[in-house]
Amino acid sequence: MAERPLSPHITVYRWAYTMTLSILHRVTGVALAVSLLGFVLWLVSASLGADAYAAILPLLTCVPCKIVLALAVAALIYHLCNGLRHLAWDMGWGFERADARRSAALVVIATLIAAALCCYFIFRLGAGPA
Amino acid sequence: MSLRTPLARALHHGTARDGVGHWLIQRVTAAALAPLAIWLLIALLSLPDAGYRTVITWIAAGWNPVLLMLAVLIAAWHAWLGVQVVIEDYVHGFLPKTVALLLSVFVHVLLAAGGVYAVLRIALRSHA
């Protein structure tokens, strides 16, 4: 491949917290693709019957697993909130620097509140009757 | 009038004319996933427990199977498009990139098919 001109790499720009949100959108997106694998495995195990489901149930109820589950839910909420921000941009709304910073702060606050709320329900979730 | 050279046309270089399609489908699936994700989160986290009976009953109830299948299908579609862009940006070299892209398609189609099959199996069995 011939040497082609490249745009300046991002390291030449002064860091702004909106850049962290931008890369987090990708990171959570990839994490959610992996989470989708877990979600489908959960559905498949439920479809295979009570014994198969009982075998994977500890993955929903043990404490380390609940932490992973809570992180996945937090990633989903972040990706959802920031995704709505992206959709607004795509329609031409909120492109001014002040607006983009305000919506970034809003995304972080909304994610923290919603994720904390979901964490409460995740850690409350029990295995139920056998 | 085209500004492309005859040689470029003969070599099939240049736009494949589907770049906007990728961008647009990513947004349309995102718009569909937003309400589905909110529904799924609220529905799952308000289950009284994660036991087999509770889960099976919920999956098969009412319109839940339809919404669940849509959620899995559209999520797999959206994830495939997103992972594709990430691979294109960060995996270098023709062979590794091609292998990663192909693997990503296969895994996402498998997830979509597996998820839909599982939901159908549960829903149809409980109504039999």
Image: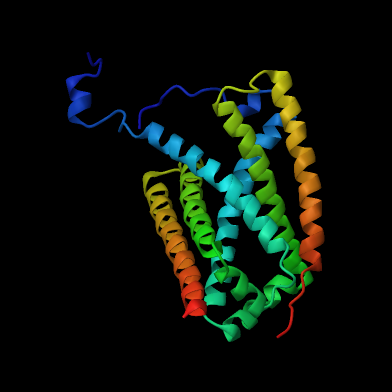
Q: Quadrant of residue A104?
A: top right
* Residue at 51% over, 75% down: B122
Residue B83 vs residue B87, the one in the foreground: B83
Lateral position of residue B89 relative to residue A112, left or right: left
Compared with residue A5, is residue B40 higher up or lower down, i.e. above or below? below
* Residue at 52% over, 22% down: A7
Q: Position of residue B12 (x, y in %)?
A: 23, 32
Residue A12 vs residue A128, the one in the foreground: A128
Compared with residue B25, is residue B106 higher up or lower down, i.e. above or below? below
Q: Quadrant of residue B117?
A: bottom left
Q: Position of residue A114 (x, y in %)?
A: 77, 48
Lateral position of residue B107 relative to residue B68, left or right: left
Q: Position of residue A62 (x, y in %)?
A: 76, 73
Q: Could you tell me if residue A16 is visible in this image?
A: no
Compared with residue A102, is residue B62 higher up or lower down, i.e. above or below? below
Q: Classify the position of the N terminus of chain B by image quarter.
A: top left
